[in-house]
Image: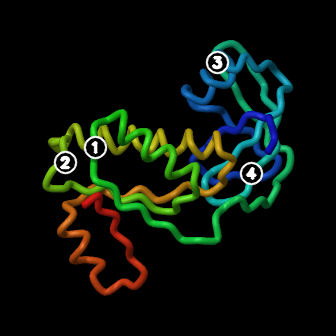
Amino acid sequence: MSSIPRVYFAKPLSVGECITLDEPARHHSVNVLRLKTDADLLIFNGEGGEFNAKLHVSGKRAAVKLISYCDVNRESRLHLHLVQGISRSDRMDMTIQKAVELGVSRITPVFTLRSVSKLDSDRLEKRIQHWQSILTSACEQSGRCMLPALDTPLPLDRWLNQTAAEPGRYILDPD
């Protein structure tokens, strides 16, 4: 895998286009990685493939010019769906990160009888946004070009009822 930094951009992309990086991507590229104008970047939008790009920094603004498209496929041939009981924030963050790095294609957080985390609707929305950013960062780090789906959390019994007829389900239970 290349050592060229990867940046996620959540819109359709095309060769020759010049795009302005959002604040988190700009900050990471310019302040954290200390990249300068003409630095190479790889840009992906989560739909597959990635674009070779050149960075242009001007004051508090950073833009990239998309030079060429590379149709890479680093996705697992297996369709893995992780249904995960919601745990305390740092543990859930690590679970999502590692699941993405291991090739999971869908993650469904579920509320279980013994879930420690009780979230009202506002906190739940913030957690979903946070998990989505963890998922995106894990794709950037691991070289994946497809973003896994992150479902809205639901009670475990409801998920079990919705998927009762699906073949090939495995449930891991420590007991």
Mark 3, residue position:
32
- Is 140 placed left or right of 71 in the picture? left
Mark 1, residue position:
87
Above or below — where is 54 with respect to 111? above
Question: 10 or 127, which is in the foreground?
Answer: 127
Type of the residue with mark 4: Glu
Q: Residues within 10 Å of mark 2 (few under 14, many from 20)?
A: few
Above or below — where is 63 with respect to 112? above
Residue 111, position in %: x, y?
A: 21, 54
Determine whether label 1 and label 4 are within 8 Å by CB.
no
Q: Residues within 10 Å of mark 3 (few under 14, many from 20)?
A: few
- Is 74 placed left or right of 83 in the picture? right
Q: Which residue: 73% across, 57% down?
A: 49
Q: Marks 3 and 2, how far apart in space?
A: 36 Å
Question: 25 or 117, which is in the foreground?
Answer: 117
Q: Residues within 10 Å of mark 4 (few under 14, many from 20)?
A: many
Mark 4, residue position:
50
The secondary structure type at the circle numbered 2 is loop
Determine whether label 1 and label 3 are within 8 Å by CB.
no
Foreground label between 1 and 3? 1
State which tag comes first along the sequence, 3 or 4: 3
State which tag comes first along the sequence, 3 or 2: 3
Q: Marks 2 and 1, how far apart in space?
A: 6 Å
Mark 2, residue position:
115
Type of the residue with mark 2: Ser
Q: Residues within 10 Å of mark 1 (few under 14, many from 20)?
A: some
